[in-house]
Image (cartoon, helix red, strand yellow):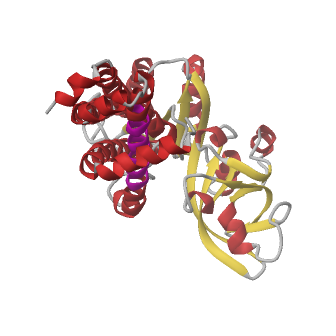
């Protein structure tokens, strides 16, 4: 295998037959190149959908209120629907078995300051479970807890960028932040994979907000996550029943789409899952077709190569070469060409994906890439196909008598 004369002979053969070596190599390189690009783009699409849901729990349901668009049971159109604590408790108690986490939201816009630094930020007044719906990552300290709700404490959890904006020369944890003239103690600093906007938020207890900003029991939104043991269809049915019951509770028409709006992530997740499955099948078929075309191409070339070298094989046999050595030379040559050009195809495919990434990311394809192990497996498959395609005719040719081989045209 490591005989210097053998390798010298192989490279001489490749150099002598450049055209057929190049054709064989191009077939493999193009197959691997196309395979890499196709699967890279497919992975980019999957990454796009994955990032679209990174900010929220994948099993979230968002319940929002608005104004009625239709008259119903003596109630006029245009009536404002306002959620209260009792509605939150109703959802929590009535649907508790199917709920994993639940929180209310109250939205505020405040001017926040610390010493000489100040800026405007959005505040969300929430329950402790909100942490799990937003996939909030606590960097320092803690999140809002039940004691904060019970005691209506003036505590805040701020985003990483709020700390960077206001607390230039110190740590925010344990300090105070002034929100519209009211001092809150910072008990936590968080990060969020949702991006800069999410990290410029401030969270406070929902009960504190109700006490200090209106002295009422109003809430703007109810969010929850359904039990992950539900499949997509069960989760969609769960959300539909929740919407139906809330519309009845607020005397809203069934076909009124504005008064009570329930957004169920299960519907989007089901669509994305189905899309990814179809995309995977399509890419698999195209990729398989590409590999088959490459296999057919390299096989045909290898068969032609062996036939072309029949006289050479005859001369080798006449000089005492064994059938095994003849087959070995042809197989090693096939493997060498296939492996080298397959690697070039891989490098070129990865290079094209890297070069095109900025353009692709502007067109809904995020971080296109491909598993190197997958491409290596495809290359190995082509090498195996090329070896088999070369082995069978080489084996057959090695058994021909020298005098017969020398007569071949």
Residue 363 point in image, percent of width and height? 32, 57
Residue 341 is a magenta residue: yes
**x, y percentage for residue 356?**
36, 60
Front residue (pair 55, 100): 55
In the image, what residue occupies the spot 29% across and 27% down?
A: 254
Number of marks = 0
Q: Quadrant of the N terminus?
A: top right
The stretch of residues the image draws in magenta is 331-349
Tell me the quarter of the image containing the C terminus: top left
Q: Position of residue 47 (x, y in %)?
A: 45, 45
Quadrant of the rendered structure where residue 228 is?
A: top right
Residue depicted at 34% across the width and 44% down the height: 79
Residue 365 appears in the rendering: yes
User: In the rendered view, would you say 199 is above or below 378?
Assistant: below
Q: Residue at x 51, y 35 (%)?
A: 58
Residue 280: x and y, percent? 35, 31
Hey, which quadrant is residue 46 in on the image? top left
Residue 189 left/right relative to 392: right
The answer to whether residue 10 is left or right of residue 315 is: right
- Position of residue 31 relative to residue 94, above or below, is below
Q: 396 or 284, which lies in front?
A: 396
Residue ranking furthest to the right: 174
């Amino acid at each position: 295998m490591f005989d210097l004369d053998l390798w010298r002979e192989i490279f001489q053969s490749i150099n002598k037959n450049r055209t057929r070596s190049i054709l064989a190599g191009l077939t493999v390189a193009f197959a691997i190149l196309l395979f890499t690009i196709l699967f890279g783009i497919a992975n980019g699409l999957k990454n796009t959908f994955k990032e679209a849901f990174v900010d929220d729990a994948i099993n979230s349901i968002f319940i929002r209120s608005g104004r009625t668009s239709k008259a119903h049971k003596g109630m006029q159109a245009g009536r404002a629907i306002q959620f209260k604590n009792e509605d939150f408790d109703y959802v929590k108690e009535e649907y508790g078995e199917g709920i994993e986490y639940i929180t209310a939201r109250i939205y505020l816009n405040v001017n926040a300051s610390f010493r000489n630094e100040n800026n405007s930020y959005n505040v969300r007044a929430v329950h402790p479970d909100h942490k799990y719906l937003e996939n909030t990552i606590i960097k320092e300290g803690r999140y809002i807890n039940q004691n904060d709700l019970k005691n209506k404490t003036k505590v805040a959890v701020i985003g990483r960028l709020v700390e960077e904006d206001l607390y230039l020369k110190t740590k925010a944890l344990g300090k105070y932040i002034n929100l519209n003239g009211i001092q809150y103690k910072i008990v936590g600093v968080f990060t969020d994979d949702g991006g800069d906007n999410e990290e410029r938020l401030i969270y406070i207890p929902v009960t504190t907000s109700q006490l200090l900003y209106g002295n009422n029991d109003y809430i703007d939104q109810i969010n929850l996550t359904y039990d992950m043991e539900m499949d997509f269809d069960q989760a969609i049915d769960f959300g539909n029943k929740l919407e139906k019951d809330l519309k009845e509770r607020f005397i809203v028409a069934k076909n009124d789409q504005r008064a009570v709006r329930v957004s169920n992530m299960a519907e989007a997740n089901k669509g994305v899952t189905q899309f990814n499955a179809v995309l995977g099948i399509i890419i698999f078929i195209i990729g398989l077709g590409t590999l088959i075309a490459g296999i057919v191409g390299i096989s045909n070339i290898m068969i032609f190569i062996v036939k072309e070298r029949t006289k050479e094989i005859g001369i080798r046999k006449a000089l005492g070469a064994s059938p095994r050595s003849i087959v070995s030379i042809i197989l090693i040559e096939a493997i060498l060409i296939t492996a080298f050009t397959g690697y070039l195809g891989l490098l070129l495919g990865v290079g094209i994906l890297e070069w095109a990434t900025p353009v692709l990311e502007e067109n809904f394809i995020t971080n296109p890439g491909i598993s190197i192990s997958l491409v290596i497996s495809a290359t190995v498959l082509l090498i195996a196909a090329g070896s088999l395609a070369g082995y069978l005719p080489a084996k057959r040719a090695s058994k021909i008598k020298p005098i017969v081989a020398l007569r071949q045209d």
